[in-house]
Image (cartoon, rainbow, N blue to C red):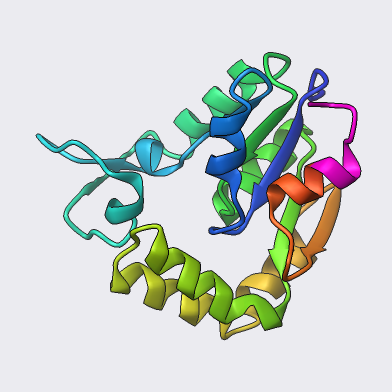
Amino acid sequence: MNNKGTIIISAWGCFGKTTFANNNPKICLDIESIHYSRIYPDKIVDDEISKGDDNFVPNPDYPQNYINDIVANLGKYKFIFITLARELFAELDKLGIEYTILYPLPTRKQKILDDARKRGNNERFVEILDRILSSKEEHDFLKNNCNYKDFIYLPDDEYVTDYINRMYPNEK
């Protein structure tokens, strides 16, 4: 399978995926995994607040339901943003779907934590980000076990918009 002209970007939280997608809805789709991986009975989900919420039921259809939506939108958008998740990469790799990972430099940790608080994430989620960013385990797993097209370290002063403007200047 190919990407049908769609560039799939998996980027860290607080890199501006949602902002770019909201500002460019004709060319970009931001697929938020929380709507696929969790079931919240009788609750309206606020994406940023819910990321640290434990009051949900795991969705038994995840990650296949998420992968299905990615595949269904190939060719419809120039860019699709996806979450940074091991189980998704394994499925994308099986299907031969190319993706780029945007990862922070270690010097960006405090900025990510501050940005997470500013956008409304609760302290539990900020602590999860802190734990992941304080360890090389997730980085090393992604870097060494995923079949990504590119693994890019996003400079501390850049967001997804800057990356796209630099790498794909004629796509907007």
In the foreground, 4 or 65? 4
On the image, which quarter does residue 37 sit in?
Answer: top left
Residue 107 shows in this picture = yes
- Asked if residue 170 is among those painted magenta in the image, a careful observer would answer yes
Q: Is residue 88 left or right of residue 139?
A: left
Instruction: Answer left or right for 130 relative to 4.
Output: left
Q: Is residue 30 visible?
A: no
Residue 83: % across, % down? 56, 48
Whether residue 129 is situated above or below residue 3 in the rendered picture? below
Which range is magenta? 165-172
Query: Which of the pair 102/147 is nearer the observer?
Result: 102
Q: Quadrant of the C terminus?
A: top right
Asked if residue 47 lies left or right of residue 82, the reply is left
Residue at point 59% right, 84% down? 135
Number of marks: 0
| Magenta region, main secondary structure | loop
* Quarter holding residue 137: bottom right
154 is higher (above) or lower (below) than 69: below
Residue at 35%, 62% in the rendered image: 121
* Residue 94 or residue 66, whichever sits in front: 66
The reply to whether the magenta stretch includes residue 156 is no
Q: Position of residue 159 (x, y in %)?
A: 69, 55
Q: Is residue 172 above or below residue 102?
A: above
Q: Quadrant of the N terminus?
A: top right
Q: Residue at x 63, y 27 (%)?
A: 24
Residue 28 location (% of width, % of height): 64, 27
When the figure is inspected, residue 23 is found, relative to residue 141, above or below; the finding is: above
For the point 38% across and 68% down, the residue is: 117
